[in-house]
Image (cartoon, rainbow, N blue to C red):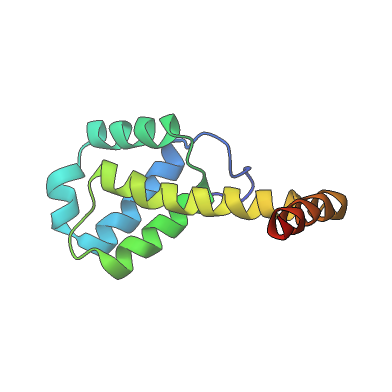
């Protein structure tokens, strides 16, 4: 996959060739027997682009499949693995952008203390 593109750009034919080459290298004829056609590559490209998966999630999903899948994943299986990494990245970004609000924390703490004293 080319590194000059942003991670959120749509996957193109070059990206898909990279992905399929890796999957063929990992699973050999098991992958090509099921997904070795140009139509299958187009289906995967459209499916991965439709759910908005980036290159980072694709690379991580590929590494996961190498470690845990003894046979090639189907497109839905690959998408689910990649979505896990996408959710993790989004959660990490959200937590990095959230600054603690001490005033709100104090109000909540005061409310909890008040209800304990009742």
Q: Give coordinates of residue 60: x percent, y percent.
A: 45, 59
Q: Give coordinates of residue 95: x percent, y percent.
A: 68, 54
In this rendering, position of residue 38 left or right of residue 4? left
> Residue at 36% across / 52% down in the picture?
81
Furthest residue toward right: 103
> Residue at 59% across / 51% down in the picture?
91
Furthest residue toward front: 118
Location of residue 37 with respect to 22 vertically, above or below: above
Location of residue 63 with respect to 86 vertically, above or below: below
Q: Give coordinates of residue 19: x percent, y percent.
A: 38, 50
In this rendering, position of residue 99 left or right of residue 43? right
Quadrant position of the C terminus in the picture:
bottom right
Location of residue 13 with respect to 68 vertically, above or below: above
Q: Give coordinates of residue 61: x percent, y percent.
A: 40, 56
Q: Nearer the viewer, residue 7 or 88?
A: 88
> Residue at 29% across / 37% down in the picture?
41
Task: Tell me where residue 50 sits by quadrant.
Answer: top left
């Amino acid at each position: 996959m080319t590194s000059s593109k942003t991670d959120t750009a749509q996957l193109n034919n070059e990206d898909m060739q990279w992905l399929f080459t890796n999957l063929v290298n990992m699973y050999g004829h098991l992958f090509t027997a099921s997904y070795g056609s140009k139509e299958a590559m187009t289906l995967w490209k459209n499916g991965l682009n439709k759910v908005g998966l980036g290159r980072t999630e694709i690379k991580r999903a590929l590494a996961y499949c190498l470690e845990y899948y003894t046979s090639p994943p189907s497109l839905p299986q690959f998408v689910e693995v990649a979505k896990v990494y996408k959710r993790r990245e989004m959660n990490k970004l959200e937590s990095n952008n959230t600054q603690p609000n001490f005033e709100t924390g104090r109000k909540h703490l005061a409310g909890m203390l008040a209800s304990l004293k009742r």
